[in-house]
Image (spheres, rainbow, N blue to C red):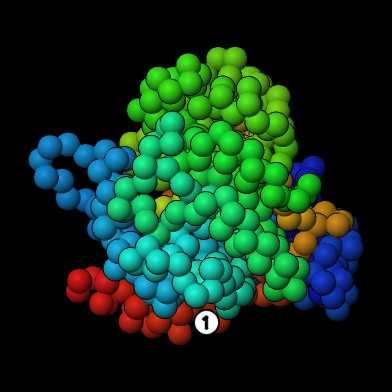
Amino acid sequence: MRLHAAAALLPGGWARDVLIEADAAGIIEQAEPNRAPGDADRARGPVIPGMPNLHCHAFQRALAGRTGRTDGGGDSFWTWRAAMYDFLDRVDADAFEAIAAQAYVEMLKAGYTAVAEFHYVHHDPAGRPYADPAELARRIVAAASGAGIALTLLPVFYAHAGFGGATATAGQRRFLHTVDSFARLYAILGAEAAACGFTVGVAPHSLRAVAPDELAAIVALASPAAPIHIHAAEQGREVTDCIAWSGSRPVEWLLDHADVDARWCVIHATHVEGDELRRLADSGAVAGLAPTTEADLGDGTFPAREYLDADGALGIGSDSNTIIDPLAELRQLEWSQRLAHSARNVLAVGNVPVGRALYQRAAVAGAQALAQPIGAIAVGRRADLVVLDGDHPALAELPADDWLEAAIFGPCAHPVRDVMVGGRWVVRDGRHSCEADVFARYRAAIAPVSAA
């Protein structure tokens, strides 16, 4: 693959006349500015690295728009979770795959080029294990492969309904594993990952759902390079319950009892504070934020300014997929900080514009969280590239340093023109080659779900 970009966002900033060359495996061998195009394909707008999506529950894409009602008694994360359980009762394996494929096509069109699927639905709607214990994991792999998005598959261990080993509820029956049954699932996926083209890690769901001895056993299953993801401190009630159980806050407990390092991605960490925040930053772990989901669920506001001041790494994910747009996630993140601090451009770094600073931070940290060689246009990274539409009215005639500012914070709906994954175009002129077929399968799959 040889691509010439009149402008491209390299690790050091915007550069002109960049020649990008990748080998047959899609790994960048050259990304040099001030080069003539020669016979290279010419990008049709400014080129930026593809964004890794570090936290996704693909099946929840079909739940979007279905949870706006309340019984008048107040609504919260916990009532939303009950609605999610009820919805999931009606989703079979075929629908599960069709929903995931639709979500992944939408991700690619928005500029996500890789996804970490936090995969916790393992059994059939009655809670019975499938004959193939990896049935639904294989459906995720098939959906990602068909769409052309790079996948980090994170099978989730889930065993309890609350801290202290509380018995799981009926609504959680599709999620449950013992350590032994999960180890068998992980062994199957680990044996197939390389041949099937995905990265595999582990995801102990949360301290609510995983007892301390189970957490240690699940983490021990992971290979030395495998990513480890866990939900922590998303909700205030979760923090209160964790303190009642252990005397510690969730992230504090993890830092005290688990070997949290750069392999870890702590999802949400919304209610992290003080010394716990600084220790998380020092650990090298990634804070995995999902700002639009956190806003939708009323989770709270992550202290991003303080975390960046502590040199913490943070990335973004689409989580519940109510919104699938990395630029919207970054906008919501910055705007949440503006509301919290009563200031503008809160997450800017020096004189680097806030949009570019946020985008590059999230791309690099997302690559770390997915354990994939992505997140930058640089030698040795995979050629996951996004071409912005330079003819979009919100971007036209702007100086280079304002392109991402306008794409994130300006009146710029659908600024992505073309998307490449591993040196191969998967979106051209805003359209995915399979989107019509994928949508037809999605629509057919959710019709009976909606009817029920």
Query: For the point 89% across and 63% down, which residue is it?
Result: 29
Provide residue 372's location: percent of width, then percent of height.
Answer: 73, 55
Provide residue 404's location: percent of width, then percent of height.
Answer: 59, 48
Q: Would you place residue 357 above or below residue 52 in this image?
A: above
To which quarter of the image does residue 99 belong?
bottom left
Provide residue 416's location: percent of width, then percent of height.
Answer: 56, 63
Amino acid under disc 1: Cys
Identify the residue at the far left of this view.
72
Q: Secondary structure at mark 1?
A: loop
Q: Would you place residue 196 above or below residue 159 in this image?
A: below
* In front of the other: 302 or 264: 264
Taking the image as shown, residue 249 lies to the left or right of residue 362, namely left
Q: Which residue is mark 1?
A: 434
Query: For the point 84% across and 68% down, which residue is it?
Result: 22
Taking the image as shown, residue 16 lies to the left or right of residue 435, namely right
Provide residue 409's location: percent of width, then percent of height.
Answer: 48, 44
Q: Would you place residue 331 above or below residue 237 in this image?
A: below
Q: Would you place residue 437 above or below residue 100 in this image?
A: below
Query: For the point 87% across and 71% down, which residue is it?
Result: 23
Give the tally of numbered discs. Answer: 1
Q: Is residue 341 visible?
A: no
